[in-house]
Structures are given as C-alpha cells and as structure tokens.
Amino acid sequence: MASKTLSMLLASLALSLLLTGSAEAQGLSLGYYSKACPNAESIVFEEMAKVIKVAPSLAGPLLRMHFHDCFVRGCDGSVLLNSTKGNVAEKDARPNLSLRGYGVIDRVKAKLEKACPGVVSCADILALVARDAVVLSKGPYWPVPTGRRDGFVSMANETKQLPPPTANITTLISMFASKGLSVKDLVVLSGGHTIGISHCAAFNDRLYNFTEDFGDSMINMGNVGVLTGSAGEVRKKCSVVN
C-alpha cells in the first residue's frame, strides 16, 4: 500500500514537472501571480467553494465554458465578451446558447479586482474556475499554469471551430489535431461528463488512470492559442474590452 502511494506521488510530481515545462513553452507558468496578486488562486477557490456548495450542478457547465473558450481563438476569454451593435459575439452563437455560469465568472472577477485591480485576466479565471469546480466536485486536481491575456475579438461565426455533436471520429480527430491536441486528449476530455457522478469501487484503478490523464489533457487544452506578454489585455470586466 505504501509502495503504491509513493508511486502515485512520484507520478504526480513527474506530471507536474512535465506539464510546467510544456506550459512555459507557451509563455505560461505556475504561480504567475505570486508577486502581483499572491492570493489570486486562493480567492478563486474560496469563491468557487461558495458557488459549488449552493449550485453543484454548475461544475460541468463551467468546465464546458473553458473548453468552448479554448476551441475558438484559443484560451483568451473571447467566449465571455458581449455582442455589440455591429458584431454578434461567440456567446450568442447557437453552439453557446446553452452555456451557463457567466455570473460566476463575473463574481470571481469582481473579488479579484477588489484585491488586485487590473492584474488577473478573465482567460486565467476561466482556467482556474474550471479546475476548482472539478476539484470541489470530488474530481481530479491538476496544476494550472497562468499568465494568459484576454483577447479583443469575439465573433459568432468562428464557433464553427467547436466540435459538433454529430461529428464522426475522423472529423473529431482532425478538429482536435488542428488545436495541437491528440487522440488521447480527445478521448479523455470527452470523459469530462463524468464529473459529479459516483462510480463503483471496482473501477478505482481505471479511474485513477483517467484522473491522471484528465489533468494532463486539461493543461494541454489550456495551452491552446494563448495570448501572453504584451499581446491582448487584462480586462476590467470580462464581458467588455477595456
């Protein structure tokens, strides 16, 4: 038993180191806000604990929102932008009409703005909220590299990049590959619907493998098309550009 526990810890450490290196290649890093907003991740987790306590069914939708954000223009918070007089935004496109949880993102953003004005991006909030929603639903934990910046553009017609529910496996593999995601990522991320569902103890070993793979694939997805450095901005309100 002790040997198995040690193996699990070593595997977790190795995964963390591997994924940190991958994220840094994208311009992201663990603890990105450690100086500018040291309590950022704690603030997100505390707010999410309150949310999931009263509305546990929001965990899945918040995870889905992060997925929908990353698959269109990359993980840049574009799914959060409102439509304007001359432009229909992603959130008002047909594939996104069923998304829920925008108020949660606004709530977390308001808390962060009060603590550290203009520091934490909406794109990073989406990534952290998705992780914490899963963890608070007794799902797996994974380290979230941060440092994403928010995009300026959100167009409804670009939601065609989202995998349609009727797509066959060949189409899905191609769509995931276009984002730099593997067949394994496709299979594992498709299992996100299991969040919040109890499983028989007979599946424990398989579930352990799934949770390890899930964390790996979530970080891969969170690296898609990120804006870093001087690209993009840090929005003051997630629904509008500054």
Image (cartoon, rainbow, N blue to C red):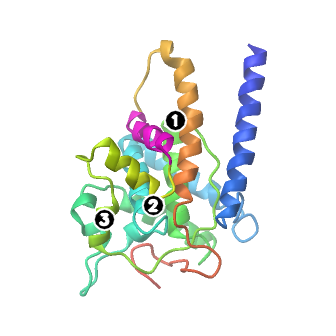
- Our reading of the magenta stretch's main secondary structure is helix
Q: Total of numbered circles in the picture?
A: 3
Badge 1: how crowded within 10 Å, few (<14), some, or many (20+)?
A: some
Which residues lie in the magenta part?
182-195
Badge 2: how crowded within 10 Å, few (<14), some, or many (20+)?
A: many
**Label 1 element class:** loop
Query: N-terminal of the two: label 1 or label 2?
Result: 2
Query: N-terminal of the two: label 2 or label 3?
Result: 2
Q: Please indicate whether residue 152 sits to the left or right of residue 113 in the image.
A: left
Q: Is residue 46 something that shows in the picture?
A: no
In the rendered image of this protein, does residue 35 appear above or below residue 174?
below
Residue 112 is situated, as x and y percent measured from the top left of the image, at: 57, 67
Label 1 close to label 2 by CB (< 8 Å): no
Residue 206 is situated, as x and y percent measured from the top left of the image, at: 53, 22
**Label 2 element class:** helix
Spatial CA span between label 2 and label 3: 11 Å
Q: Which residue is mark 2?
A: 70
Q: Which residue is mark 3?
A: 159
**Label 3 element class:** helix
The residue under label 3 is which amino acid type?
Thr
Q: Which residue is mark 1?
A: 139
